[in-house]
Image: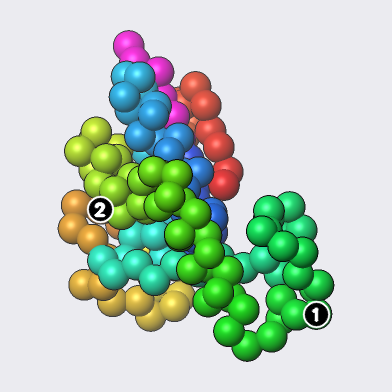
Amino acid sequence: MSKKLAIIATKGSLDWAYPPFILASTAAALGYETQIFFTFYGLQLLRKNLDLQVTSLGNPAMPMPMPVPVFMQALPGMQGMMTRMMKKKMKSKGVASVEELRELCIEAEVKMIACQMTVDLFDFNTSDFIDGIEYGGAATFFEFAGESDICLYI
């Protein structure tokens, strides 16, 4: 009987995309049966075309090459600049992209469930999401999560 990891992904920004995919792909490689339930803004991580952003605003722990006062972080264009800086840094350090990590999860047979209620709430079109995912509600996820050895809320 294999161990089970259940993850609830609720965030859809670049920096919050990494934890569910890194943890899920690692767990699957270690033999865990793994599921990720994507709800609310976490659904952005299942889009075919990812355009994820990162912002330092409201994230004082984000390391910056030079100090940027909070009021400047709210200026137009700063989020795009921060995103480009983060992507450049990740690339220079050899960090896999979100798309690559997501593909690793698919190859490792991590089950990905899109929250049907959220899809309906935001009038999302299922054709905008990657193939191979399932749609279900919280009850669908709880069947697995209730038996999991580890359940993470990200």
* Front tag of 2 and 1: 1
- In the picture of the structure, the residue carrying the numbered disc 1 is 71
- Residue 3 magenta: yes
- Indicate the amino acid at tag 2: Ile
Label whose residue precedes the other's in the sequence (2 or 1): 1
Q: Residue at x 40, y 18 (%)?
A: 3
**Residues at badges 2 and 1 in contact (C-beta under 8 Å)?**
no
Q: Is residue 154 visible?
A: yes
Q: Residue at x 31, y 54 (%)?
A: 99
- Decide if residue 47 is on the left or right side of residue 76: left
Query: Please, is residue 29 above or below residue 82 in the view?
Result: above
Residue 31 drawn at (x, y percent): 32, 19
Q: Quadrant of the N terminus?
A: top left
Q: Is residue 139 visible?
A: no
- Indicate the amino acid at tag 1: Phe
Residue 53 drawn at (x, y percent): 50, 69
Q: Residue at x 44, y 78 (%)?
A: 122
For the record, the magenta segment spans 1-6
Q: Residue at x 49, y 22 (%)?
A: 149
Q: Secondary structure at mark 2?
A: loop
The label number, if any, that marks residue 6 in the structure image = none
Viewer-nearest residue: 106 or 72: 72
Residue 107 drawn at (x, y percent): 20, 38
- In the picture of the structure, the residue carrying the numbered disc 2 is 133
Residue 126 drawn at (x, y percent): 26, 70
Viewer-nearest residue: 1 or 30: 30
- Residue 7 magenta: no
Query: Please, is residue 150 above or below residue 9 in the view?
Result: above
Q: Secondary structure at mark 1?
A: helix
Quarter of image, res 70: bottom right
- In space, the residues marked 2 and 1 are separated at their CA atoms by 40 Å
Viewer-nearest residue: 22 or 5: 22
